[in-house]
Image: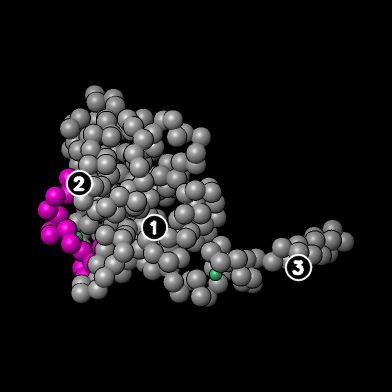
Amino acid sequence: MGKSHFSFGKFLAGLLFPPRCLCCGAVTGSSPLCANCSAKLHPVGRDPCRFCGRERDRCRCDYGKGLLFEQAVSAYYYEQTGRALLQRFKFRGDIACYDQVLAPLFLEKTAGAFHQVSFDWIVPVPMYEKQRGRFDQTGYLARSLSRHMGIPCRTDLLKKLRKTPPQHLQKARDRGENVKGAFTACKKSELQGVCILLVDDVATTFSTLNECAAALKGAGADRVLCASLMTTAGKIKNQGDQHE
Ligand SMILES: [Zn+2]
Ligand SMILES: [Zn+2]
C-alpha cells in the first residue's frame, strides 16, 4: 500500500515536473541534458598539450613559455553548452549543472592526469572577501576534487586583495594587468616546499592561475599544478575565434 502510494506520487511528480534539460529546459525523460545540448558540450580531447591542457591545434602556449605553473588540465571547452552550464553554476549556484553533468569527467581527468603527483593541498582560486556571500564556485570545485582525490582542501593559504573586473570581459592583452598583484599567499611557514593543486573554474589566458602560482611559489611552495573545469577554446588554427 505504502509502496503504491509512493509510486503514484512519483508518477504525479513526473507529470507535474518532468525532468528538463539543465541547459535549454526541454523535457528530456531522465537525462540531465537533451540530446541537442549534450552534442554541444565539448570535452577537451585526449592527449592535450601537457603545459596548458588544450588540444594541440588550440594550444598557443609554446611549450609552457610564460606559464608560472608546471602543468594545467581542463575538462571542457568554455563554449556553447559548457558555457551555459558554467554560468548557471557560477552565477545562480545551480550545483546540479556541476554534480549531474560536469563533475564525473572533471574528477576523472584531473585525478588521471596527476596520479603520479603527491599533492599536499588543493587550493581554490579565491574570491575577494567582500564578494563572499556570493556562491563560491571555485571552493565547490576544490572540495569536490578533495573528496575524490583524498587530498585536503585549504582555503586559507591564498587571498584575493581586490575586486577585479571579470577576465572574460577584458581584451587578451589587458588580462595580465587586470590581475597583477591581486593575490597574496598567507601562512608562509606552512607553504615551504609543498606541492599544490590550484583549482579554477575557467582558464582564459592563464593570467589568474599565473598570479596565484607566483604568489604561492614566492611564499615557498615548491610545485604548483592546475586544474580548471573549463578552458577557453583558443583559436583552431586558421579560424577566427571570439574569445581571445
Ligand atoms: Zn537542452
Ligand atoms: Zn599548450
Do residues under tags 2 and 3 come within 8 Å of each other at their CB atoms? no
Instruction: Identify which amino acid the numbered label 2 is placed on.
Output: Phe
Q: Residues within 10 Å of mark 1 (few under 14, many from 20)?
A: many
Residue at image coords 27%, 44%: 208
Q: Picture coordinates of residue 193 (x, y %)? A: 19, 33
First reached walking from the N terminus: tag 2 or tag 3: 3
In the picture of the structure, the residue carrying the numbered disc 3 is 15
Looking at the figure, which quarter contains the N terminus? bottom right
In front: mark 1 or mark 2?
Answer: 2
**How many numbered marks are there?**
3
Q: CA distance from mark 1 to mark 3?
A: 33 Å
Looking at the figure, which quarter contains the C terminus? bottom left
Residue farthest to the right? 1
Q: Is residue 75 above or below residue 137?
A: below
Residue 69: which numbered mark, if any?
2
Which secondary structure is most common in the magenta stretch? loop
Instruction: Identify which amino acid the numbered label 3 is placed on.
Output: Leu
Q: From this viewpoint, is residue 213 visible? A: no
Residue 209 position by quadrant? top left
Q: CA distance from mark 1 to mark 2?
A: 19 Å
Q: Picture coordinates of residue 219 (x, y %)? A: 20, 30
Residue at image coords 50%, 42%: 135
In reply to whether residue 167 is colored magenta, the answer given is no
Q: CA distance from mark 2 to mark 3?
A: 51 Å
Q: Which residues are magenta?
A: 54-70
Residue at image coords 41%, 30%: 129
Q: From this viewpoint, is residue 139 visible? A: yes
**Secondary structure beneath label 1:** helix
Q: Picture coordinates of residue 78 (x, y %)? A: 37, 61
In the picture of the structure, the residue carrying the numbered disc 1 is 106
Q: Picture coordinates of residue 100 (x, y %)? A: 53, 59
Residue at image coords 27%, 52%: 171
